[in-house]
Image (cartoon, rainbow, N blue to C red):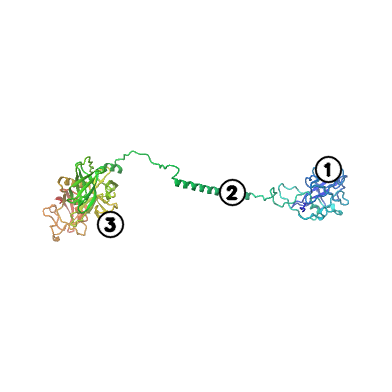
């Protein structure tokens, strides 16, 4: 198979010089007919005679192959011997081969016959066969004689191609001299030259390949990391970590707290607070109390000790765990207060008593008790209101156990078991005795039930508790301040109405009593005490019991549509 041979134009120059022509460059402008460009000099229309001794020496484009090398494109043809002064000798463009060296291809090429009248001009017969087609006859064909004017064809010198630029494919031409170059390389198309035979990747393809490699590497690294991390995690989980666990912790601090803090108040008060376990023939209960003096007197609620009756037992448990038996000194259900006493106990620490008249709404308070038998429980809150008229009890049915309290209201959590416990101010002084709560389900009732706190707790003011406790300790009985009138508890209007003559029972106004001496008449409506409005008979009783017997009150009375003010000195009655 003979590859296509690019055309080379060899034109003998006048005087023996060789004209060099290369393959035409696409887009190049051909010179006008009849003009040849040789070294920048216009060629004559008729070529001059050849120089003696160098007739028609063929000139090749580029560096000639070494002598004896095969001619590209087919079998080697015979070439005339090289020698100086030999007519028809081959002259190469560039350095000639050494005398006697073989022509590339291994065989001496055979010189084509000279055209008649043109000494030394090589003539090739016809157009080279297409790529891969055998040459006719297997060798170079004889060139026909030149016709007149055949040498008038213009010669072109093509500009040198840029290094690395693709070699254009051979173009068909009517001129057979432009289609043959036995030493030209076979056209490789428009692609770049290859060293390995594979296609050269473009810059973008190389970038994509690198990116794919990076992504694949990252995925592989993530997979390996996940496997390793999972294995380490499983190992740590099964073996409890890599070592012993030691959690961070704050260093120890001094145990003291500010005296007015909840912790400081509780630290001082807890040794004086006790839990009472009361049991009787029919029922039992738990409550709270606090130490009044070193003689063993303890103040609590009347309803706490009620289950003991006349033959029950009362067990007192102190904050340190000591236990002692107690007995009732005195109690008053109207005030809901009772005093018990323990004997044989040393180191008692009484709680200091404050003054409930100094309390203001919003003052912080602390409550201590045993809610649901959880002794030593401390809660805190504020004073929500003062002088709340509260009635509690009434389970007996004859109203003998109803208590009337002008109470302090607090939002400190108070629950069943807190009854009888202290309500303390920021100085750690007792300002109230926790007595009742209002539950969402049952309304107002004593702490003997099992209702929980909803933030509405009530305490007996300590001023009232102090007076009653002193009376109970000293006499075993408490006195109640009285007005000396009977109230109509069914009156639907605003205020407390005194009963009428036809209401039945006892007289509406006790003859010679405090009310009679102040000028109160049956049917009068008392609307205020010391300038503070009262809206019912219960409120009038609460306001009255907030005072001591012998205290003077200013009553606002409405009679026959007119209001008048009456001055009254409270009387006294003993509790049973």
Residue 279 in the image, given as x and y percentages of width and height: 21, 51
In-image side of 340 versus 1 (left or right): left
User: How far apart, in angstroms, are the residues tagged by discs 2 and 3?
Assistant: 75 Å
Q: CA distance from mark 3 to mark 1?
A: 133 Å
Q: CA distance from mark 1 to mark 2?
A: 58 Å
Q: Is residue 324 visible?
A: yes
Q: Position of residue 330 (x, y in %)?
A: 17, 48
Q: Nearer the viewer, mark 2 or mark 3?
A: 2
Residue 445: which quarter of the image?
Answer: bottom left
Crowdedness of circle 1 by 10 Å Cα count: few (<14), some, many (20+)? Answer: few
What residue appears at the point 18 percent right and 47 percent down from the top-left corner? 327
**Near-viewer residue (102 or 201):** 102
The residue identified by callout 1 is 100
Which residue in the structure is indicated by mark 3?
Answer: 441
- 326 horizontally vs 249: left or right: left
Disc with the residue nearer the chain's start (3 vs 1): 1
Q: What x and y, as percent, mark residue 7?
A: 78, 51
Q: Earlier in the sequence, mark 1 or mark 2?
A: 1
- According to the picture, the residue beneath numbered tag 2 turns out to be 213
Task: Kindly give the residue lying farthest to the bottom in the view shown.
Answer: 502
Residue at the limit of the structure toward the left, as seen here: 512
Q: Secondary structure at mark 2?
A: helix
């Amino acid at each position: 198979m003979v590859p296509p041979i690019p055309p080379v134009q060899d034109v003998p120059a006048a005087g023996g010089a060789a004209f060099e022509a290369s393959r035409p460059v696409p887009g190049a402008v051909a010179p006008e007919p009849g003009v040849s460009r040789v070294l920048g000099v216009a060629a004559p229309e008729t070529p001059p005679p050849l120089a003696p001794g160098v007739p028609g020496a063929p000139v090749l484009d580029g560096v000639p192959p070494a002598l004896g090398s095969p001619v590209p494109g087919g079998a080697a043809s015979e070439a005339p011997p090289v020698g100086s002064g030999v007519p028809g000798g081959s002259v190469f463009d560039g350095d000639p081969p050494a005398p006697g060296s073989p022509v590339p291809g291994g065989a001496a090429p055979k010189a084509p016959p000279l055209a008649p009248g043109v000494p030394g001009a090589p003539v090739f017969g016809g157009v080279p066969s297409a790529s891969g087609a055998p040459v006719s006859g297997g060798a170079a064909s004889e060139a026909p004689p030149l016709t007149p004017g055949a040498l008038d064809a213009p010669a072109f010198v093509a500009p040198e191609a840029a290094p690395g630029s693709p070699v254009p494919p051979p173009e068909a031409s009517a001129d057979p001299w432009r289609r043959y170059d036995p030493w030209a390389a076979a056209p490789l198309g428009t692609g770049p030259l290859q060293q390995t035979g594979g296609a050269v990747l473009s810059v973008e393809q190389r970038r994509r390949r690198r990116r794919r490699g990076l992504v694949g590497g990252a995925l592989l690294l993530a997979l390996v990391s996940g496997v390793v991390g999972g294995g380490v995690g499983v190992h740590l989980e099964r073996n409890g970590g890599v070592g012993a666990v030691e959690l961070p912790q704050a260093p120890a601090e001094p145990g003291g707290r500010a005296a007015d803090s909840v912790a400081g108040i509780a630290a001082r008060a807890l040794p004086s607070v006790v839990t009472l376990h009361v049991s009787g023939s029919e029922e039992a209960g738990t409550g709270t109390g606090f130490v009044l003096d070193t003689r063993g007197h303890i103040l609590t609620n009347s309803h706490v000790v009620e289950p003991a009756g006349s033959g029950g037992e009362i067990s007192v448990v102190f904050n340190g765990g000591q236990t002692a038996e107690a007995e009732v000194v005195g109690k008053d259900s109207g005030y809901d207060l009772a005093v018990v006493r323990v004997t044989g106990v040393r180191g008692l620490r009484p709680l200091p008593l404050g003054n409930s008249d100094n309390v203001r709404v919003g003052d912080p308070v602390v409550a201590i008790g045993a809610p649901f038998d959880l002794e030593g429980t401390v809660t805190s809150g504020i004073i929500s209101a003062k002088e709340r008229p509260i009635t509690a009890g009434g389970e007996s049915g004859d109203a003998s156990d109803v208590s009337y309290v002008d109470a302090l209201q607090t939002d400190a959590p108070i629950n069943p078991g807190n009854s009888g416990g202290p309500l303390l101010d920021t100085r750690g002084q007792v300002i109230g005795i926790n007595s009742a709560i209002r539950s969402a389900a049952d309304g107002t009732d004593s702490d003997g039930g099992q209702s929980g706190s909803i933030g509405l707790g009530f305490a007996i003011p300590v001023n009232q508790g102090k007076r009653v406790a002193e009376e109970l300790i000293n006499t075993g009985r408490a006195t109640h301040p009285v007005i000396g009138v009977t109230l109509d508890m069914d009156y639907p209007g605003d205020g407390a109405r005194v009963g009428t003559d036809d209401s039945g029972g006892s007289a509406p106004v006790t003859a010679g009593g405090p009310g009679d001496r102040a000028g109160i008449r049956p049917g009068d409506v008392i609307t205020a005490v010391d300038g503070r409005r009262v809206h019912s008979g219960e409120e009038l009783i609460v306001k009255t019991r907030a005072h001591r017997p012998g205290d003077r009150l200013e009553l606002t009375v409405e009679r026959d549509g007119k209001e008048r003010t009456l001055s009254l000195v409270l009387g006294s009655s003993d509790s049973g």
